[in-house]
Structures are given as structure tokens and as C-alpha cells.
Image (tube, grey):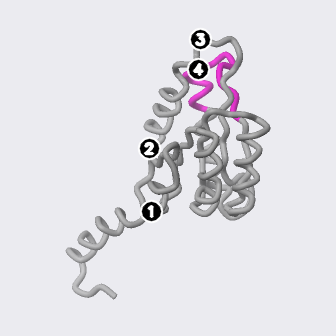
Amino acid sequence: MRNVFIGILLAAVLPGTLRAEPIKIGVQTSLTGDAATFGADIRNALELARDQLAPGGRYEFIYEDERCDPAAGVKAAQKLASIDKVKYVLGFSCNSPLLTSAPIYDRAKIVAISATASTGDVPDVGRYMFRLFPNDAAGVDVLIPYIAGRHKHLR
């Protein structure tokens, strides 16, 4: 999944690589709180990708902490869209901040890519929101037959 995430990131910003100024990419993820572990993974993957695949300061990541909280997600989205004026956003450790911030990114025509949020509502939140992780319903469709084939009773 990390390779796909990195590939999409680079493909999304490739057309702007000839510019002299760094390309600003917003990263909305949980940097504190219960889901900080996911945010740390996202941050580490992005930093590694940038250092290995595009050294030299071509990409600037602007991290905003959503704390796995819908209100914090809105604040992060408003800052990235209005103040930082990013064209791309990555991250989204949790479903609820993704859902509250997606309309902000959609109105601003900011491409947003979620690496880990699994909510089934994502396809309906805007034309600019993409998810790399399968939604919960798709996972259940695969998991139930797998478990049923190995156990006599499901509760």
C-alpha cells in the first residue's frame, strides 16, 4: 500500500516539478491522540518517499493534526485550503475528520487522497476525494465467506 500511496503522490504533483518553488502538499493526519500511531506511519512514509525519490526540497509537506476529531479535521482543512493554499492533501488517519473536511477540499478543488480511512461514505463526499484503502463494506464482503469456510457457527 505504501508504494501505491507514494506513486499516486508523485503522479499527482509531477506536472509541477519544473517550477522553481517547492510544491506544497498538505498532510492532514493524527499526530496526537489515540490514532497518532497511524499519523506517524503516514509522516514517516512521506518523509522517506521525499528523501529517496525527490531530494532537494522539491516538495514541502505541511502537517496538520486532525487528532481523529471531526472539528479538528475542519480546522486543519480550512487552514490548508485558505492559509497554506495547497493543491494536494494526503493522510486522513480517521474516518470522521475525513468526512467533515472533504467538503472544504471539494469546494476548493483540492485533490485529497486518503491512505487509511475506511469509511464507505468516501465515494459520495466529492469529486476530489480519493481513497487507497478499501471501505469497510468491501472488507466485510470478503471476510464473512472466509470465516464461514473455516468455522461452523458465526454469531
Q: Nearer the viewer, mark 1 or mark 4?
A: 1
Q: Who comes first in sequence, dot 3 or dot 4?
A: 3
The residues tagged by marks 4 and 2 sit, at their Cα atoms, a distance apart of 19 Å
Mark sitting on residue 87: none
The residues tagged by marks 1 and 3 sit, at their Cα atoms, a distance apart of 37 Å
Q: Nearer the viewer, mark 2 or mark 1?
A: 1
Q: Secondary structure at mark 2?
A: loop
Q: Are marks 1 and 3 in contact (CB under 8 Å)?
A: no
Lateral position of residue 19 relative to residue 85, left or right: left
Q: Amino acid at mark 3?
A: Leu
User: Residue 146 or 96: which is nearer the viewer?
Assistant: 96
Q: Amino acid at mark 2?
A: Met
Q: Nearer the viewer, mark 3 or mark 4?
A: 3
The region drawn magenta spans 48-61
Q: Residue at x 59, y 38 (%)?
A: 109
Q: Residues within 10 Å of mark 3 (few under 14, many from 20)?
A: few
Coordinates of residue 53 in the picture (x, y in percent): 54, 22
Q: Nearer the viewer, mark 3 or mark 2?
A: 3
**Residue at the right extreme of this rendering:** 83
Q: Who comes first in sequence, dot 1 or dot 4?
A: 4
Mark sitting on residue 120: 1
**Residue bearing the label numbered 3:** 18
The residues tagged by marks 3 and 2 sit, at their Cα atoms, a distance apart of 27 Å
Mark sitting on residue 54: 4
Mark sitting on residue 1: 2
